[in-house]
Image (spheres, helix red, strand yellow):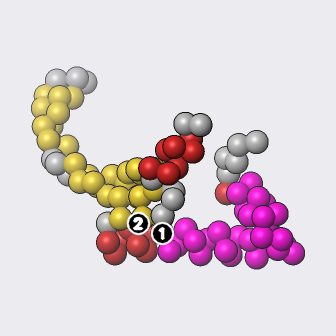
Amino acid sequence: MAVKHKKEMVARLQDILGLKNRLQARVVFDAVIDVIKEQIDKYNECWIKGFGKFHIIERKAREIWNPHAKKKIIQPMTRVLKFKPAREYKRELNR
């Protein structure tokens, strides 16, 4: 069964950890997500051994064509979050 929503992930976490209620599982889940966000904000990356690396890349500002206005516009520089799976995880996926 694929877990698609936070609610489902929290329920699965509750089952795995054997917690008494969903509130405890939600607190754990939110704490993990907050730690990942803090690491990305502070270091522009977060490496989780055996799972993968979240990292920020910066896309340069560039000139693009707007077909509706029929003119060139400048798209500003953007920061994008990327994920690169760990080698071990890739092997596990391809078994």
Residue 14 in magenta? yes
Front residue (pair 50, 61): 50
At numbered mark 1, what does the secondary structure look like: helix, strand or loop? helix
- Kindly give the residue lying farthest to the right in the view shown: 20
Report the quarter where the N terminus lies: top right
Q: Which residue is mark 1?
A: 36
Position above or below: 15 against 85? below
At x 78%, y 64%, the residue is 16
13 vs 19, left or right, is left
Report the quarter where the C terminus lies: top right
Mark 2 or mark 1: whose residue is earlier in sequence = 1
> Which region is colored magenta?
8-35
51 vs 2, left or right, is left
Q: Are marks 2 and 1 in contact (CB under 8 Å)?
A: yes
Q: Amino acid at mark 1?
A: Ile
Q: Crowding at label 2, few (<14), some or many (≥20) Cα neighbours within 10 Å?
A: many
Magenta span dominant secondary structure: helix
At x 45%, y 69%, the residue is 37
At x 45%, y 53%, the residue is 86
Position above or below: 29 against 89? below
Q: Amino acid at mark 2?
A: Cys
Position above or below: 79 against 33? above
Q: Which residue is mark 2?
A: 46
x, y percent for residue 13: 74, 64
The quadrant in which residue 26 appears is: bottom right
Mark 2 and mark 1: Cα distance apart in space: 6 Å
Front residue (pair 87, 61): 87
